[in-house]
Amino acid sequence: MAKDTKQNHDIKESTKIKAPIVEALKTAYDNPTYQFHIPGHTKGKAIFKDFRKLIGEKALSVDTTDEFDNLGTLHPATGPIKEAQELAAEAFGAKKTFFLLNGSTAGNLALAMALTKKGQKVIVNRNCHRSILTGLIISGAEPIWICPNRIEDWSVWGNISAETIEKTLIENPDTAMVWITNPTYEGVVSDIKSISAVCKKYNVPFIVDEAHGCLWNFNKHLPETALKLGADAVVHSLHKTGGSMSQSSMLHIAKNSCLDVNAIEKALKLLHTTSPSLMLLASLDAARANLQSKNGQNLLDRAVKNAKYLRTRLDNIPNLHQLKGDFGYKTDVTKVFIKIDGLSGKRLESILEIDFNIEVESASDIGVLILCNLGNKRSDFKYLADCLEKIASTNYQDIYYLEKRKHMPMLEPQIKMSLREAFYSEKETIKKEDAIGRISAEVVAECPPGISILLPGELITEEHLPYLNDYKTLDVIVNG
Ligand SMILES: Cc1ncc(COP(=O)(O)O)c(C=O)c1O
């Protein structure tokens, strides 16, 4: 079934791919009106000149919001926007797709608001994105934290096992929802099929934050999307790797899901801006159309081949190691997490930046994360591999300041108070060193990857301190 859908994209290549928002915006651009409505820069005429020069008059001309020029509306979805969402649902294999502004964050907030209630239990992985926490703070649902396996050598969270989910469901038979992140930021993939089977066995809705996996349905060498493996809803940050513009994402409801789609739509309406950017919406439409087109398929194919090329080159560099799927779990080949003996990830990041003009996705105390993207050429990877060869064979130890920063705690949270209660409690701001033994009143989460170091309601311990280098003070519960 899943394979069929992946093959369907090949069939579509010979036919003209529709992109209704893109087409409607072009029509509006070609037929300008006398404009007496927002946005007040009026097609860029009233904008700071240097900015206009930088981004161009054409971009400013199509910077408009819904309602005007027959572009349709986002809430409720009408016209080209409705049509584009339907085409996206078909392309991703969903029953219903919502276009998101404010990223997957908006999708996670809407899912929490629509599907969970105060006091309800939701099983969530400890390394979830902070938007899930925010959603649960809003709804008042109680997270039951599960810790994925730890990949200690790399200081990263690994996969989530179906056994852990089942055990937690048995211990908490009143669980209202299971909500997990897949893949991890570094590309580690969990066995979603088995987790989904467990959720079905216990009749619990299953949501997957697939923010980093939006390309999966479009290439057979990438893992299978949770939409095809039994999840009820999935969020995708198309802007991260799918080729749309920053902050544009999608929320998909699976074909066989019984989730209350109406409630999700209502929550989204409350959360979304009332002036959605047509440019962002068009970029989602364009990204979907591109992924279905011959050009997009070639680009994705190239990205996978480039990733394999890079990985082969890296395998031959002494002192350099890459996180690979051969330690008993699967990974997304396009996310390459590497480390070099004797260098912290942060240090490697600055060497790449300062000496080689290379900017990577992120760095931890251990390694750096490289994304093999649709837009990268083979020559980019050749250059990167050449530079890494040089770095690995040079003694950089003494040249740069050695980072003492720690990246991501992989601690079992000691929860002393509910998430929402802690967040809304009376709080005081105290010196970080004085906060040990106190209860956190805030979400402390650095981006990337937006995974929380401290949760509201969590006991602050000495072990947290190395991860809080950038914080002088913390918010704690008064008397807590
Ligand atoms: C797993 C995960 N979920 C959700 C988000 C939020 O995505 P967005 O930036 O599209 O709002 C992120 C962002 O990094 C993420 O890593």
Image: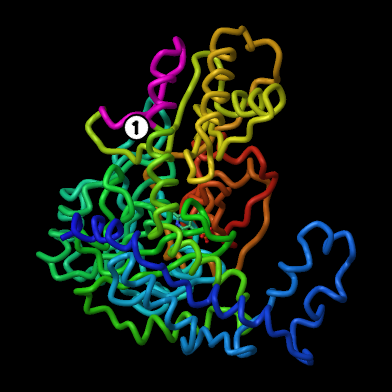
Position of residue 480 measured from the top left corner of the image (x, y, whole percent): 53, 59
Please state the extent of the stretch shown in magenta in the rendering: 308-326
Decide whether residue 54 is among the magenta residues: no
Q: Answer whether residue 421 is visible to the viewer in this image.
A: no
x 41%, y 28%: residue: 154
Horizontally, residue 164 falls left or right of residue 383, namely left
x 55%, y 27%: residue: 345
Camera-side residue: 118 or 461?
Answer: 118
**Which residue bears the numbered disc 1?**
151
Horizontally, residue 209 falls left or right of residue 225, namely right
Horizontally, residue 2 falls left or right of residue 120, namely left
Q: Is residue 66 above or below residue 474?
A: below
Position of residue 1 measured from the top left corner of the image (x, y, whole percent): 15, 60
Ligand 1 under 8 Å from disc 1 Cβ: no
Q: Is residue 456 above or below residue 437?
A: below
Residue reaching furthest left?
201
Camera-side residue: 73 or 179?
Answer: 73
Q: Is residue 219 above or below residue 317?
A: below
Camera-side residue: 326 or 207?
Answer: 326
Position of residue 388 measured from the top left corner of the image (x, y, whole percent): 55, 19
Camera-side residue: 195 or 358?
Answer: 358
Q: Answer whether residue 218 is visible to the viewer in this image.
A: yes
Residue type at numbered disc 1: Ile
Colour setting:
rainbow
Q: Is residue 262 above or below residue 343?
A: below
* Callout 1 secondary element: strand
Position of residue 343 measured from the top left corner of the image (x, y, whole percent): 56, 18
The crowding category of the residue bearing disc 1, from other C-alpha atoms within 10 Å (few below 14, some 14 to 19, many at least 20), is some
x 48%, y 65%: residue: 249
